[in-house]
Image (cartoon, coloured by chain):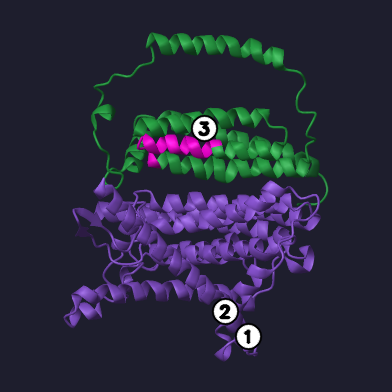
């Protein structure tokens, strides 16, 4: 049953990701990105990571993609000048990647240990398990340092963006 | 397979019941809003259809059904059709995790059924926030697809507004989540049982009064209601993002707005006002020897809390003028956000100290 769902989600993710770059209308591209985010959230749900699924939708679909749409609509991007015949470069980059992933997957190098607890935990009760608690504990114990560094990097990026955007207004009236 | 069929049938019955309640409430709200506004402004409100105008919602619905459905020339037909549906569906999906009554379970043919909630998932409140954040797409795309300047401006305004105030909604409920220690709306409501002094609005060690104020203001902004109705400001943008919509598609936007109001009211009742818990310990019906009917009292309390919150929306609309756009943004980011963040810090410290003292 879960294999069927995985097939559906994975197939839709692949299809919609291709549509994001293949569609001519940027608004349609953004919409297929939205569909893709939803199916990624679906993948999280079948992995019993409901918290990540919700955060995926809230952050990516709810906030970031809305900003993309905002920009696309404000800039009124022309439909034609998006491609500059980059097929050659894309092929050069993509073919090695494809070969790599085929080699990796066929060799079984990435296969997980089937006896690990996440595979043995039979039927899952979405109500009983509290993976929010688990994520919180892991973030604030094992991965505390990377977590804090990531937040610092984001803060720097935010301040940088504000400084860049504010430069035009530094003289004259306060906004 | 029969078990699966039975489960499906029960779920579909629950969904149908909740949808029925939501649609009926929206019908009542459309009338109630006009009546309440009328009384507040010293007039009668709708009086023509039926006694005291109580059949007005049905007249409106029939009118909207039979209006011509116009798709403007130059509009993007696909997105123009999709936008109202994209607006409506996320709002209705959110009602799946609202607990309407006591957290009971009983058995039907070997399956345990919770009669007052469609699905008690452990991330209930995040689920609602996730789908609420998608309602913005319907508005933005509706504004863009209409191929009209007014609609586009309305859609863009609404995008900026919803993103800004969604953040405040999310942050204002963090205090409640810290107090309850859960994201499930059922557990949050259960934690507030036993009298109004246990409601998270008043509960020690950290009363969430400021968080509640931030939540109320932010939800008014998120549902595009007066005084934050800039996306549809009629004195500036004709009707904002749905200027070009008519007939049933307009009705969908209308339905979505009222259903959204109802959803945020239900969430406010469940998070801050004790949900279905009565403001006194236990229930009166339980005391006089009818504990099996106590759910009537509990669901009625939930309805009272939700409707009081909805009344607040009408009250604000009758009282306040619309904000200017820069005022709206400045208020959201420079006033609401610091209060919400401060509330998280204070609540965390209070809960920590409280746990240490035990």
Distance from label 1 to label 2 (Cα)? 8 Å
Question: Is most of the magenta stretch helix, strand or loop?
Answer: helix
* Residue B235 horizontal/vertical position (percent): 77, 69
Chain name for mark 3 = A
Q: Residues within 10 Å of mark 2 (few under 14, many from 20)?
A: many
Which of B107/A30 is in front? B107
Q: State the residue position of label 2.
A: B31
Which disc number belongs to residue A12? Answer: 3
Tag shown at residue B46: 1
Q: Which residues are magenta?
A: A36-50
Q: Chain of mark 1?
A: B
Q: In terms of sequence position, does the residue under pointer 1 or pointer 2 come before the other? A: 2
Q: Residue furthest left?
A: B289
Observer-nearest residue: B15 or B278? Answer: B15
> Total number of numbered labels?
3
Rendered location of residue A147, percent (x, y): 45, 32
């Amino acid at each position: 049953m879960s294999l069927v769902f995985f097939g559906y989600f994975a197939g839709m993710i692949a299809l919609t990701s291709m549509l994001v770059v293949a569609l001519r209308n940027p608004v349609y591209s953004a919409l297929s990105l939205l569909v893709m985010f939803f199916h990624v959230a679906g993948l999280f749900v079948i992995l019993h990571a409901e918290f990540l699924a919700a955060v995926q939708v809230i952050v990516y679909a709810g906030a970031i993609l809305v900003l993309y749409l905002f920009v696309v609509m404000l800039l009124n991007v022309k439909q034609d000048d998006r491609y500059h015949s980059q097929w050659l470069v894309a092929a050069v980059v993509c073919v090695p990647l494809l070969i790599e992933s085929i080699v990796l997957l066929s060799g079984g190098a990435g296969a997980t240990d089937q006896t690990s607890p996440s595979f043995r935990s039979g039927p899952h009760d979405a109500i009983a398990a509290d993976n929010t608690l688990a994520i919180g504990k892991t973030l604030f114990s094992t991965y505390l340092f990377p977590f804090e560094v990531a937040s610092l990097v984001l803060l720097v990026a935010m301040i940088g963006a504000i400084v860049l955007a504010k430069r035009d207004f530094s003289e004259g009236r306060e906004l | 397979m029969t078990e699966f069929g039975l489960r499906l049938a029960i779920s579909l019955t629950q969904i149908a019941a909740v949808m029925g309640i939501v649609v009926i409430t929206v019908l009542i709200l459309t009338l109630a809003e006009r009546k309440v506004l009328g009384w507040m402004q010293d007039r009668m409100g709708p009086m023509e259809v039926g006694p005291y105008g109580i059949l007005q919602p049905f007249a409106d619905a029939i009118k909207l059904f039979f209006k011509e459905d116009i798709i403007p020339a130059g509009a993007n037909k696909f997105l123009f059709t999709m936008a109202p549906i994209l607006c409506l569906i996320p709002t209705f999906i959110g009602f799946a995790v609202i607990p309407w009554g006591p957290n009971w379970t009983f058995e039907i043919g070997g399956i345990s059924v919770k009669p007052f909630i469609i699905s008690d998932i452990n991330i209930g409140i995040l689920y609602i926030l996730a789908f609420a954040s998608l309602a913005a797409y319907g508005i933005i795309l509706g504004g863009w697809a209409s191929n009209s300047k007014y609609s586009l401006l309305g859609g863009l305004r609404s995008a900026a507004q919803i993103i800004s105030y969604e953040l405040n909604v999310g942050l204002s409920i963090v205090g409640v989540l810290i107090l309850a220690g859960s994201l499930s709306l059922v557990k949050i409501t259960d934690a507030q049982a036993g009298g109004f002094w246990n409601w998270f609005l008043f509960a020690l060690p950290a009363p969430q009064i400021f968080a509640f104020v931030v939540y109320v203001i932010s939800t008014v902004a998120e549902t595009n209601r007066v005084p934050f109705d800039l996306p549809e400001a009629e004195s500036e943008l004709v009707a904002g993002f749905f200027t070009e919509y008519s007939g049933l598609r307009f009705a969908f936007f209308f339905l979505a707005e009222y259903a959204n109001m109802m959803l945020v009211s239900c969430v406010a009742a469940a998070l801050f006002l004790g949900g279905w818990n009565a403001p006194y310990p236990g229930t009166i019906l339980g005391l006089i020897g009818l504990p099996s009917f106590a759910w009537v009292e509990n669901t009625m309390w939930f309805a009272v809390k939700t409707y009081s919150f909805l009344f607040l929306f009408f009250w604000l609309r009758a009282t306040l003028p619309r904000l200017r756009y820069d005022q709206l943004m400045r208020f959201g980011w420079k006033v609401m956000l610091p209060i919400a963040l401060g509330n998280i810090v204070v609540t965390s410290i209070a809960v920590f100290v409280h746990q240490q003292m035990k």
